[in-house]
Each structure stands twice: as C-alpha cells, then as structure tokens.
Image (cartoon, grey):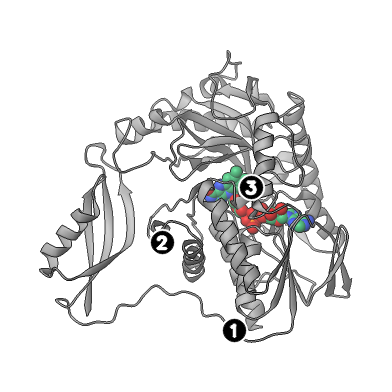
Amino acid sequence: MGYKTLHLTLPTDYSDDDIKKIIHSECGDPDFTYQIEKKSLDARHKNSIHWQITVVVFSRHFPGENYEAPQSLTLSCKKRTQKVVVVGSGPAGFFAALVLQLSGFQVTIIERGSEVGERKKAIVNLESTGEFSPQNNYAFGEGGAGTFSDGKLTSRSKHISSERHFILSEYIKAGAPEEIGYMAHPHVGTDNLEKIVVALRMRFLENGGRILFDTRMTGIIKKGSLVQSVLCDSEEIEADYVVIATGHSAYDTYRILMNEGVIFGTKNFAIGHRIEHPQNLINTSQWGRESLPGVKAAEYRLATQSTSGVPVYTFCMCPGGYVVPAAAFEEKSVVNGMSFYLRDNRFANAGCVAGVHPDMLLGHTSGPVEILDWMDTLEEQFYNFSGSLVIPGLRAEDYMKRKNSKPLDPGSYPLGVKPAPLFSMVPEIVSKAIAEGLYDFSRKIKGFETGTLMGLENKTSSPLRVSREKNGKCSGFDNLYFVGEGSGYAGGIISSAADGVKCAMAISSG
Ligand SMILES: Cc1cc2nc3c(=O)[nH]c(=O)nc-3n(C[C@H](O)[C@H](O)[C@H](O)COP(=O)(O)OP(=O)(O)OC[C@H]3O[C@@H](n4cnc5c(N)ncnc54)[C@H](O)[C@@H]3O)c2cc1C
C-alpha cells in the first residue's frame, strides 16, 4: 500500500466526512485510511479563517513507497543493578524516571507533595477558604507545576523532536486526546492532566518503580564528588545516580544544593503581572466575531521592546482560563494561569512581563542567593498588601497612566482582587517597560487596555542556571544531575520533560 501527503484547507467547523470526501476525490479509491499529521488554524484574514490540515493517506492507488513514521527514542534497555533517585515528580523528574526505568534501572522518585487526589483537595480548599498548604499547592505535589496548569504542550525548543514525540506518545497512552500528536498548539488542560498523571504513575509502579510521596529532600550525603545518598525528612536513600528535578519554585531546595557545593549562576528571566480580559473581547479582536464554530477560544502572543531596551511580552496565555494563586510557600503571593480542556471560561489571561536580568533589579552584579532573597521579599510584599491571598489589581489603562483604578470588575481569580497602584509594587524599570508595552499591545488587540492587571507573575522561568555538563551532570560531581525548569535550561512542560529524557538517555548510555 502506498501513501501520499495531502495539504487540506477546511472550514473551522469541518467534519471527518468532509476530510474523507476530499481524500476520496483525490485518490479515487473508497478503500483508504488516513492519519492527520499537522493541524493549525490560519486566522491571518478574519473573513477567511480556516484550518490547514496535513494528512497522510494510505491507498493502493498511490505508488508503493514505505511510510516513515516520525522518529521516537531508541532506548538502551538491559537489566541493571544501579539505583537511581529522582527528586521531584514534575514533567522533568517523571520523564527522566520513566526513561531510566525503561532502560533497566531501579528507580525511586521522591516528591515533597502528595499524590494528585490529595493535592487536588488542598487546591480546592485553598481556592475556597484561602488556607494554604505548604506541601500541596499549584507548585508542589504529584506531577509538579505541570499538573494544575494550562496544559499547553507547545515548546519552542529546538533539537527535541524525538523526545517530544516520545513524551506526547506517553501522554496519549495515558489518556490524553490523540490530537496533541498533531495540533500546532496542543493543549490538554488540567482536567486531563490530573488523570494522565495517575495513569503514568500506575504504569511506573506496575513496572517496579517506587514513588515516595510526602517526602522532601533535605540534603545529600557525598564522598568527594560522588553522591552516596539523598537525605529526606525521615530517611536516607542510597543511590548510584541522583537526578534533581525540583522545579524553579523550590527556593529552599536551591539553597540546600548551594550549601552542598552545587554551582549556580544568574540568568535572564521576567517579572510582571497577569492580565485578564473577557474572552469575547479577545475573540472579537482576533477573529472579528465573538465565536467561531469548531474552535474553542482565541489566543494571542504579543511582544515588543521598550525604549529602555527591556523586552515586554505576554507569556503562557490561557484562553478560556482562570488566574490562580500559585505561590509555593506560606505568606507569599504569586499568580499564574490555568484552564480546562474545553477552555470555556468567560475570561482570557496571560502573563504580561518584562524581561530582566537579576543585576538590573538589584543594581549591581548579583549572586544566586541575592536574587532568591529578592524574589522571596517581593512575593512577601505582594502577600502583605492584603495580609492574605487577595491580590492587588489595576486596569491596564490606569497602569499606563500610573494612576489608581476604581473598583474592578470581578474576574476569574478565586480569592479576590483589590484595586492598588500595581505599578509601584514592582521596580520602576519593570513597570515603565510594561506600561509602554501595553500601549503597543493595545494597538495590536482592540480593547487590550481595558484588561485588568493582577498580582505578581515571576515564574516565567528561573533566574538561576546550574553549572552543568551537556547531559545534565552538575559541575564537580560524578553522579549528580539537575534537570528541568529549576536547572535554568528548560521552561514549560515539554521542554522540561525533554530535558529529563535527555539526561536519562545520557545516564543509560554512559
Ligand atoms: C499554574 C501554572 C500553569 C502553567 N501552565 C503551563 C502550560 O500551559 N504549558 C507549559 O508548558 N508550562 C506551564 N507551566 C509551567 C510548567 O508547569 C513548568 O515549566 C514545568 O512543570 C516544569 O517542570 P519541572 O519538572 O522542571 O518542575 P516542576 O513541575 O516544578 O516539578 C518539580 C517537582 O519537584 C518537587 N519538589 C521540589 N522540591 C522538592 C524537594 N526538596 N524534595 C522533593 N520534591 C521536591 C515539587 O513538589 C514538584 O512536584 C505552568 C505552571 C503553573 C504553575
């Protein structure tokens, strides 16, 4: 059976029958099969928004070439006796653990939070009462920051195509919709992720893996450059290899590692706020109408450069989503965005941030501890604004003019937003750049200036980068690896997971 690749243009509300009809007329054979390879929305012209779909059609009417499926990973599987401890069950930690397990290692994951069911209870309680759990929140707990997230599975990282293919295939096997394998902007949503995380865990356990929940790494025991075991609150776990995948919210863990001789430097990152609009406003601006059959909700991605040279951009846009309290520690306030698969909430939100280097914020050449201290203080100041997780907010047009807002319309944030001079709560270099950015964004999206800016967004990426070799091994250590977002070499679900996979592949082939 031969195959042919077809590029189709279809209305947004097409059906499978529409695809079949086109294929039938193209190959003249009623007996064909097809698979979608790529699907993206072309919304460049508002009066002709359509899907562009690439399909591979298999039919005996096509020349008999062999179809080459996208490359996945080639794992080096053999029985091994070495023990690996992976610290953190987020995308980086879990996928490193899975690949190590499939390669034959005995793998233990330790996770400071609980399994996802318990974690969810803590998050529901947080959002209904404001009571914060230091163990289970939007940052910590099974699946890491990637679980109660927006669940966008996009990544701009280059050179990870086989890792991405492996990760998306594992997500699909664990219950994710198959479309994530071909959508240009794949999205699973929190509701799917909660189930996927459980299915991945069950398979890992069935294959002999061990997961210790409610178990926090508090230190390491080392002899020279060799780590011998990982210290936890109540036990010591021996290891031949240790993979740290603790994310970029675990400031306490960064400090532990620094004390143990792991070398960190500072790097560019971003701070700012979340901005929220009615989803209808974004749909109308992007599509010229409030709804489009066959498409959930409109997206945007905006970027500009301020006159001071500071880049301003929107980040992690969540169509039909919610602004959520995402701090990792008590008496700190940080916001982020999440959504469910249907993306059907009335609001759209995105980070609206300025790209900065720690030295710009601190006014001198700074070290990793200083920027962690600075971030701790800033998160604390946002908490102290209300003495609770009620967050400060301001209409974007008032932020642009540096004036206070009148009472704000209620948005999606569950614990309340109070008007405040938000521009004075972040360094001036940041607020001035964001104000300029907002002028530019309001020219690109009609009504953008009517949105509400909320809280502190400082988790776009880590301000720290570990000193490590290409395979993730920490400089000065023989068997200690640091992967994922916390390492400063990845950001987002897919690139963090891919970083974990690459490290595991390196360990298993070393
Ligand atoms: C609300 C929200 C929405 C997001 N939406 C998206 C999105 O749509 N798309 C996207 O690509 N990215 C999104 N992100 C970012 C994404 O979740 C992260 O980039 C990704 O999860 C990083 O993966 P990681 O494995 O490196 O770290 P994490 O996911 O942060 O996982 C680290 C894990 O380590 C555990 N841990 C920390 N310290 C210790 C310790 N000392 N001992 C034991 N365990 C420890 C933590 O509990 C956690 O489970 C979102 C983040 C948030 C908070």
* Residue position for label 1: 77
Q: Residues within 10 Å of mark 2 (few under 14, many from 20)?
A: many
Q: Label 3: how many residues lie within 10 Å, few (<14), some (14-19) or many (20+)?
A: some
Give the amino acid at mark 3.
Phe
Q: CA distance from mark 3 to mark 1?
A: 38 Å
Residue 132 x/y as whole percent: 74, 37
Secondary structure under tag 1 reads: loop
Residue at disc 2, CB closer than 8 Å to ligand 1: no
Q: Is residue 214 left or right of residue 61?
A: right
| Alpha carbon separation for disc pair 3 and 2 | 30 Å
Sequence-first disc among 3 and 2: 2
Q: Amino acid at mark 1?
A: Cys
Expressed as whole percent of the image width and height from the top left, the position of residue 509 reads: 63, 83
Q: Secondary structure at mark 3?
A: strand
The answer to whether one can see residue 247 in this image is no
Q: Nearer the viewer, residue 332 or 194?
A: 194
What residue is pinned by disc 3?
269
Q: Which mark is residue 181?
A: 2
First in sequence: mark 2 vs mark 1: 1
Apparent side of residue 246 relative to residue 57 in the rendered image (left or right): right
Picture layout, residue 276 above or below residue 459: above
Image quadrant holding the N terminus, namely bottom left
Q: Is residue 388 above or below residue 324?
A: above
Q: Is residue 436 left or right of residue 179?
A: right
Q: Depth check: give the residue in front, 458 or 232.
A: 232
